[in-house]
Image (tube, rainbow, N blue to C red):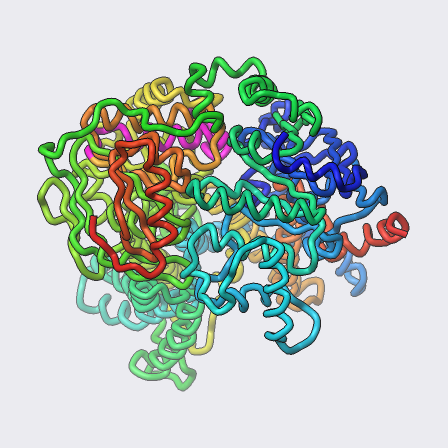
């Protein structure tokens, strides 16, 4: 008499066939789209309560995020965010939680911001780009090495080690900006600014730099690696159960190292692409916070890169349009983070109900259920 | 029907009545409209296949589950058994199949764990309560012995004492006999008899017919969640063992009976007959030595023993059975052979080569396979398809993967072949493996491990929790594999199974192999039992 659920697997199935394909598709849609819809509706309520016009706000978001040149800005922002998402998806699929993304991103940024102005002076532009990209990528990957090794060797909780390493890494990147990479011409703590001519070229006829092409190509390659190769399947086995991975003969320590390095590398690459294509320099104490922004969306996309792309696009519209729309509406730009947080909240709630539904359990938590049914029981027992 | 007719002296009013009890899990009707009376001073046997709904019924009585429909009456009063605690308050005690004792604690400490109320432990009152219960059971239990030092039969007596700690009126024994040697079963029988004389109702769950016949006063048979047959005390008394067997088998399996195997198989599987060795061809001592453990030790965990200084020689075509109490190093033994756990000292040889330093995959390639007992969490990836699970250990290998890319036609063809060869019942090879029944998951694991030229296979509890049809099939697979020259290390907690299949039975206790019995006489089970009783403090003899 162990777990009734696993015992139940040996029992006789109900006559009905279970779920139809259509209802499965519906359920997936509900679980992915509904949190976003509910978050937007709630934000409308919040806007009304604080006396703003939600219709005006969201039409401004659309106007700045999509219309005119807005879509180009949106796509420009997608370049680093897609790479970022891929970096998170790779480790999360292995049920490893790399939460050191901020430092990995900032170290990638600072290395590129610091070295590329010097590289441009000594080598052709394409070579400088290549070397910079490699350096930024390597910096992001390097910052995962210690947590990865600890996890692989001793099973140390990576949530704690990556977070701690994140604080250290952010500190180091700020020190680098104020120290060796400080722009000697000004007193503000920031690196030298890359001349626009020495940044990524733009796609002809647009203001979108070629970073988006790099990003899409890399992200598709990673997607194929995860879904079409024996490595991807091993990763899925490892992610679903370390016990099975051991039984099957998967080299778990090696897998942990590969996943962390890949994750850090993709986040470092995201930083390099944004630096070379758009930012051009790095100021101290600046953290774009892209990691926290894409985090809910990689889960809404079920850790699948292709399904995450529309969510990232959605966020980029909200971000590009939302900043200007907030100004127009007299809102703080942090209002966007509230919308993101609301998505996370509703996602958790809907997941909770989804899991309860899958298990066939009551939607009420046990304590609450006892309290409710207890009212009736007392009558029955007396 | 037997000495226990003393039952008649007690009142015939049921102490516990289940009325129209029903319980549904997602996709499964576990209990369907079950009405059952448990009378004081009687042993009520609950018979049925794995998955018939016995466990669910018991967990409802024990307060671990609430019925969806129907109700329970105690002394004619409708009650709500809302938690294991309230079950205890109603005087319902359960002895589970798995040991609930903490092996590093003494008997007394284990017994006091369940006692609540009062911040301080009261050893003296606990001691006198234990003396009281020991007297009721007619056994002697050393309160200061460590739980791990007890033989299985003694552990079970402690479990019974634990279940009755707060004064039991109904004692539920969930399959208590599968690993018990004949002597220990006789002891248990005697204890149960004393309890029923005191007017306690005993619910005895088993799938062995001969025990139901010899120990039961009343018998109920469950099939597919329904109560199919009830035999009351008067009827049972008038039935010969043969007629009883026929009636119960018909109830347990209905028309499915012919699908399980021939009459002899069914009687062996259902425990109607005493198990005897079924393998005719045995390996000779001049066969090639394929697996050799030399003085192997692995680390222990707080909950399970590792193996210590285990030596063992397994020849081609030979089946060595490993008997012992669950958690005494069986998993460590299997895992150190498979390469999932590294030996801290000693060596593992495969075909004469030292493989101690080789990993799981390298050993697989040398023909070593491990059929794990944790089928659902270790054996398969529930979210992957049946096809991929069948080829889980071939990931990246030719011809199923070419340059890192899966070759769908090759994978599908091989999966289809295995599904047919092992009669895995699945809607399609692309169905989720987690959706299969327990029996089909086991067939999937066997298909995977027994393909691609295995030479040594470790089976860890290969028939545990399966329906009899699959049990029969699995045992036949093990037998056939050995007859074709395969070497088998068979770890099991079912003594009948070990007697049926093994050439030799080694006994494991506290991680050591403490003895070995040549399986060539009808006396094997008793001999194994002697090692298990006397094993606690003896030195490890190497096999």
**Residue B419 location in percent, x, y?**
37, 21
Residue A16, compared with residue A101, is above or below; it is above
**Residue A101 location in percent, x, y?**
42, 64
| Magenta stretch bounds | B428-455
**Is residue A41 in view from this perspective?**
no
**Residue B356 location in percent, x, y?**
17, 52
Identify the image quadrant of residue A225. top left
Instruction: Identify the residue at image location x=46%, y=77%.
Output: A285
Assess whether residue B439 is covered by the magenta stretch: yes
Q: How many marks?
A: 0
Residue A282, compared with residue A310, is above or below; it is below
Instruction: Identify the residue at image location x=29%, y=64%.
Output: A153
Identify the image quadrant of residue B214. top right
Instruction: Identify the residue at image location x=48%, y=55%.
Output: B155
Outermost residue on the bottom side: it is A187
Q: Front-most of A146 and B39? A: B39
Q: Front-most of B412 and A2? A: A2
Q: Name the quadrant of the N terminus of chain B.
A: top right
**Residue A350 location in percent, x, y?**
65, 48
Residue A245, compared with residue A131, is above or below; it is above
Q: Is residue A305 left or right of residue B91?
A: left
Instruction: Identify the residue at image location x=79%, y=41%.
Output: B11
**Is residue B493 in view from this perspective?**
yes
């Amino acid at each position: 008499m162990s777990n009734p659920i696993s015992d139940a697997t040996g029992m006789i199935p109900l006559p009905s066939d279970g779920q139809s394909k259509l209802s499965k598709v519906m359920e997936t849609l509900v679980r992915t789209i509904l949190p976003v819809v509910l978050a937007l509706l709630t934000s409308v309520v919040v806007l009304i309560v604080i006396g703003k016009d939600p219709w005006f706000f969201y039409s401004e978001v659309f106007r700045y995020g999509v219309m005119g040149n807005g879509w180009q800005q949106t796509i420009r922002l997608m370049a680093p965010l897609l790479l970022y998402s891929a970096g998170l998806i790779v480790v999360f699929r292995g049920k490893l939680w790399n939460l050191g993304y901020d430092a990995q991103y900032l170290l990638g940024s600072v290395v590129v911001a610091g070295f590329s102005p010097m590289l441009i002076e000594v080598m052709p532009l394409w070579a400088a780009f290549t070397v910079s990209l490699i350096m930024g990528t390597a910096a992001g990957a390097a910052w995962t090495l210690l947590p990865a090794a600890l996890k692989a060797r001793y099973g140390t909780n990576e949530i704690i080690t990556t977070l701690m390493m994140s604080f250290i890494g952010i500190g180091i990147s700020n020190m680098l900006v104020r120290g060796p990479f400080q722009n000697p011409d000004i007193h503000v703590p920031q690196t030298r600014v890359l001349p626009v001519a020495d940044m990524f070229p733009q796609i002809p006829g647009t203001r979108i730099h070629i970073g988006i092409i790099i990003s899409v190509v890399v992200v598709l390659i990673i997607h194929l690696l995860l879904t079409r190769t024996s490595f991807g399947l091993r990763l899925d086995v490892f992610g679903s159960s370390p016990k099975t991975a051991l039984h099957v003969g998967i080299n778990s320590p090696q897998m942990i190292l590969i996943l962390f390095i890949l994750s850090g590398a993709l986040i470092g690459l995201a930083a390099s692409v944004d630096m070379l294509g758009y930012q051009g320099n790095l100021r101290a104490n600046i953290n774009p916070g892209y990691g926290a922004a894409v985090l809910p969306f990689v889960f809404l996309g079920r850790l699948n890169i292709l399904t995450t792309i529309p969510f990232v696009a959605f966020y980029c519209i909200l971000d590009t349009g939302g900043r200007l729309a907030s100004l127009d509406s007299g809102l703080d730009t942090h209002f966007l983070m509230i919308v993101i947080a609301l998505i996370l909240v509703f996602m958790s709630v809907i997941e909770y109900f989804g899991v309860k539904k899958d298990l066939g359990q009551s939607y009420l938590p046990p304590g609450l259920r006892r309290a409710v049914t207890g009212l009736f029981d007392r009558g029955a027992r007396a | 029907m037997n000495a226990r007719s003393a039952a008649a002296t007690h009142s015939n009013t049921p102490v516990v009545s289940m009325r129209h009890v029903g319980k549904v899990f997602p996709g499964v009707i576990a209990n369907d409209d079950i009405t059952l009376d448990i009378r004081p001073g009687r042993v009520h046997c609950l018979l049925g296949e794995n998955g018939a709904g016995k466990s669910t019924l018991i967990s409802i009585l024990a307060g671990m589950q609430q019925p969806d429909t129907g109700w329970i009456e105690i002394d004619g009063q409708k009650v709500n058994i809302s938690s294991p605690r309230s079950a205890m308050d109603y005087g319902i005690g359960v002895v589970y199949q798995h040991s609930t004792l903490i092996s590093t604690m003494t008997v007394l400490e284990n017994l006091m764990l369940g006692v609540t109320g009062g911040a301080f432990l009261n050893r003296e009152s606990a001691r006198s309560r234990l003396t009281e219960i020991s007297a009721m059971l007619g056994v002697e239990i050393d309160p200061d012995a460590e739980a791990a030092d007890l033989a299985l039969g003694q552990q079970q007596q402690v479990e019974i004492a634990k279940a009755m700690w707060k004064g039991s009126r109904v004692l539920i024994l969930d399959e208590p006999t599968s690993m018990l040697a004949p002597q220990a079963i006789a002891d248990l029988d005697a204890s149960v008899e004393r309890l029923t004389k005191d007017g306690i109702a005993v619910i005895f769950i088993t799938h062995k017919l001969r025990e139901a016949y010899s120990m039961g006063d009343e018998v109920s048979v469950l099939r597919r969640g329904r109560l199919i047959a009830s035999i009351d005390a008067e009827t049972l008394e008038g039935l010969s063992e043969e007629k009883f067997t026929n009636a119960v088998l018909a109830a347990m399996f209905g028309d499915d009976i012919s699908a399980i195997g021939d009459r002899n198989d069914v009687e062996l599987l259902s425990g109607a007959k005493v198990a005897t060795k079924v393998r005719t061809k045995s390996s000779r001592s001049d066969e090639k030595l394929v697996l050799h453990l030399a003085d192997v030790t692995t680390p222990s965990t707080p909950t399970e023993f590792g193996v210590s200084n285990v030596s063992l020689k397994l020849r081609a075509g030979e089946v060595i059975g490993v008997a012992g109490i669950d958690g005494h190093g069986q998993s460590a033994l299997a895992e150190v052979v498979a390469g999932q756990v590294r030996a801290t000292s000693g060596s593992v040889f495969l075909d004469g080569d030292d493989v101690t330093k080789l990993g799981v995959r390298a050993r697989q390639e040398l023909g070593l396979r491990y059929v794990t007992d944790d089928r659902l969490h270790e054996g398969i990836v529930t979210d992957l398809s049946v096809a991929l699970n069948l080829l889980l250990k071939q990931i990246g290998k030719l011809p199923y993967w070419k340059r890192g890319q899966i070759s769908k036609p090759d994978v599908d063809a091989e999966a289809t072949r295995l599904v047919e060869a092992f009669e895995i019942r699945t809607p399609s090879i692309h169905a989720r493996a987690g959706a299969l029944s327990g029996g089909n998951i086991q067939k999937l694991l066997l298909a995977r491990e027994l393909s691609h030229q295995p030479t040594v296979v470790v089976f860890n509890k290969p028939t545990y929790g399966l329906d009899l049809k699959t049990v029969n099939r699995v045992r036949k697979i093990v037998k056939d594999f050995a007859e074709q020259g395969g070497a088998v290390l068979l770890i099991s907690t079912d003594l009948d199974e070990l007697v049926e299949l093994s050439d030799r039975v080694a006994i494991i206790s506290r991680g050591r192999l403490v003895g070995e019995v040549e399986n060539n006489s009808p006396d094997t089970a008793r001999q194994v039992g002697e090692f298990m009783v006397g094993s606690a403090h003896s030195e490890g003899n190497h096999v």
